[in-house]
Structure formats: structure tokens, C-alpha cells
């Protein structure tokens, strides 16, 4: 069932407090301690404890290669846009001057947003819990289309769940390296993709929640989008690229209903 206010974000109060800090303080200078080896494909990540917060996070990129630095900007911008829209994307903070020689000079810390997150699977959920997932799925499908995220269709490792009770499941979406500037160079349109398809669990999405998410996106002014993008250091996002991206996201709002067949 779609929440009356369209808010499908169910993070605990301590995570919301962390998210507030990440949004209001987008970049910090601090150290972190890596806890293990490189995980995942693409730009890859390493789990770590961020000293400033004492919390676990995944640090990206985990290596110095190619255009991996674009992942830092993409992770941060996606997380902050989701914060404004009240969507369940993990809080992200940019870390500068961390002193770790094995990592690029600027990284993104994507914080663990639940005590016991696990990769998405519906096999162990009851019917009420599965129904509770329809609203976040509808909202997130819209969000992914808007930011040209092409790595969640359907990748269960990028969508985590945490069972709250017999009727409710918390969703946490992560890993936005392959969105925004990864294959999109505004002002040209992003690559053509079939956003009207509904793969995997997206086939059970709530269209009312999807329409509510579109309404929230349409309420964002160009200045709101610019304010989020322009906070990213120019070392990882050139100002001209940021200007084009802000304009591209703003103009893309109008076509979302048609793009998603809603």
C-alpha cells in the first residue's frame, strides 16, 4: 500500500540522523580503516570503519583505475537526490585527505543503513511483507529511470532488505556508480533504455507509488538540483559537467510518465 505522503523510506532514527549529517556536510576530511579485501565488480568497494562516525561503510572506488573517480560523484549525487525525495538510498559522504595510499585521493563512503541487511530475495517473506515492498519498488523504478541508473534492473545485490516485523520490510538501495554521468553526457539525451519493462520484482511494483515519486521529482526546482550537484568537488566533477547534468535532470522530469508507461 502506498503511504499517504509517498514516503517509502523506513530507515531507523539513528540512520536518519546520519543521513542528515551526510546531506548537510557532503564532504569531510577524515580517516577510515579498511576491514577486508576488494568486493564487487565495476568500480569495486572495500568495507571499512569511518573514524569520524565510528560506523561501517563501503568505500568506493577501492582502486585507482580509469574513470572510477566518476563513481564518487555519482554515488553522492544519487544519495542526496534520494534524501530530498525520501527514497531508501543509503547515506553517502565524500571523504578527502584520508591518508590511505591504496585508495584514490577522494572516495565515497556509502554507509551501512541497517543492522542486518541482506541481498534482496522474496523466498522467505510472507504475503504481507511482499506487499509492503510494492511501494518502494514503484518509487525506485522511477528514480532509476530519472538518473539513468542501469545497474538495478534487476541486480539483487544492489537492493538490500531488512525484515522489521510480520508486515513490514525495510529496503536499502546501494551502488550508484553506474548512473548519472557514467553513460550520460548532458545536454545530449541519455542512452535509450526500455524503462517501461518491469524485470524481476519490479513486475510487482505499485504504480500509485511510482506516480507519487514522479510528483515529488517534479516539485524539485532547478536550483534544488544544482545545489546538490555543485557541492561535489570539481576534482571529480567538472563544473561544466555539473551544469549540464543539473539541466539534464531538470528537463528529464517532464518525460518520466511516458518513459515508464504510467
Image (cartoon, rainbow, N blue to C red):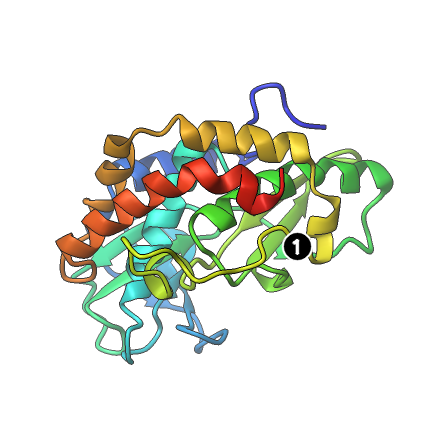
Picture coordinates of residue 22, whole percent (x, y): 32, 42
Residue placed farthest to the top in the image?
4
Picture coordinates of residue 176, whole percent (x, y): 43, 58
Seen in the picture, residue 229 relative to 238 is either above or below; the reply is above
Horizontal relation, residue 53 to residue 113: left or right: left
Q: Can see residue 201?
A: yes
Considering depth in this image, is 97 or 227 the residue closer to the camera?
227
Report the residue marked by disc 1: 197
Task: Residue 24: name its quadrant.
Answer: top left
Residue placed farthest to the right in the image?
127
x 23%, y 32%: residue: 223
x 62%, y 37%: residue: 262
Considering depth in this image, is 94 or 217 the residue closer to the camera?
217
Seen in the picture, residue 235 relative to 125 is either above or below; the reply is below
Task: Residue 97: name its quadrant.
Answer: bottom left
Task: Residue 91: name its quadrant.
Answer: top left
Q: Which secondary structure, mark 1?
A: loop
Crowd tier of the residue under label 1, counting other residues whose Cα lies within 10 Å: few below 14, some 14–19, many 20 or above: few
Amino acid at each position: 500500500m502506498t503511504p499517504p505522503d509517498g514516503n517509502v523510506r523506513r530507515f531507523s532514527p539513528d540512520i536518519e540522523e546520519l543521513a542528515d549529517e551526510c546531506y548537510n556536510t557532503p564532504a569531510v576530511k577524515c580517516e577510515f580503516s579498511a576491514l577486508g579485501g576488494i568486493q564487487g565488480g565495476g568500480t569495486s568497494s572495500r568495507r571499512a570503519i569511518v573514524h569520524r562516525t565510528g560506523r561501517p561503510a563501503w568505500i568506493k572506488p577501492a582502486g585507482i583505475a580509469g574513470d572510477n573517480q566518476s563513481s564518487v560523484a555519482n554515488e553522492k549525487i544519487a544519495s542526496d537526490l534520494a534524501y530530498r525525495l525520501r527514497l531508501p538510498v543509503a547515506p553517502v559522504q565524500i571523504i578527502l585527505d584520508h591518508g590511505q595510499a591504496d585508495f584514490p585521493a577522494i572516495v565515497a563512503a556509502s554507509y551501512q543503513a541497517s543492522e542486518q541487511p541482506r541481498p534482496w530475495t522474496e523466498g522467505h517473506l510472507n504475503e504481507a511483507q511482499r506487499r509492503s515492498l510494492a511501494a518502494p519498488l514503484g518509487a525506485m523504478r522511477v528514480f532509476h529511470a530519472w538518473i539513468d541508473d542501469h545497474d538495478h534492473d534487476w541486480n539483487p545485490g544492489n537492493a538490500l532488505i531488512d525484515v522489521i516485523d510480520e508486515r513490514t520490510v525495510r529496503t536499502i538501495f546501494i551502488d550508484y556508480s553506474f548512473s548519472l554521468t557514467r553513460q550520460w553526457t548532458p545536454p545530449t539525451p541519455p542512452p535509450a533504455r526500455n524503462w517501461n519493462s518491469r524485470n524481476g520484482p519490479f513486475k510487482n511494483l505499485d504504480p500509485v507509488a511510482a506516480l507519487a515519486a514522479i510528483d515529488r521529482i517534479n516539485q524539485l526546482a532547478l536550483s534544488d538540483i544544482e545545489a546538490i550537484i555543485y557541492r561535489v568537488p570539481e576534482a571529480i566533477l567538472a563544473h561544466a559537467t555539473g551544469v549540464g547534468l543539473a539541466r539534464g535532470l531538470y528537463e528529464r522530469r517532464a518525460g518520466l510518465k511516458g518513459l515508464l508507461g504510467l
